[in-house]
Image (spheres, grey):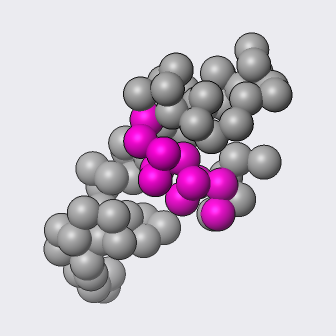
Amino acid sequence: MQKHRICTNCGKIDRLIDGLCNDCYDEERDNLKRIKAFLSKHPQSNAIDISIETGIPIDDITRLIKKGAIT
């Protein structure tokens, strides 16, 4: 039986996937796809460039970088 826990992103109590509730996990997965698509066209971009061009908050981008999802 999987326990409900607090999402590390939004604070909602839910079953977590990688520390995130289902909504935040889906959003993070979508953001990651958008970031990777952007970086494939602009590989020299930094986190600020990515944030400006994609509209993804810089905090979300830096969290993905720290997780190792963006290299």
**Position above or below: 36 against 19:** above
Q: Which region shows up in magenta?
A: 56-66
Most foreground residue, 38 or 30? 38
Q: How many marks?
A: 0
Occupied quadrant, residue 68 = bottom right
Rendered residue at 30%/71% (across/down): 7
Main secondary structure type of the part rendered in magenta: helix
In the rendered image, residue 62 lying in the magenta stretch gets the answer yes
Rendered residue at 25%/63% (across/down): 10
Occupied quadrant, residue 38 = top right
Quadrant of the frame with the N terminus: bottom left
Rendered residue at 51%/33% (across/down): 51
**Position above or below: 42 against 70:** above
Residue 44 locus on image (x, y percent): 81, 28
Most foreground residue, 42 or 34? 42
Most foreground residue, 68 or 62? 62
**Position above or below: 62 against 43:** below
In the rendered image, residue 18 lying in the magenta stretch gets the answer no
Q: Residue furthest top?
A: 41
Residue 65 locus on image (x, y percent): 65, 55
Rendered residue at 25%/78% (across/down): 6
Q: Is residue 66 left or right of residue 28?
A: right
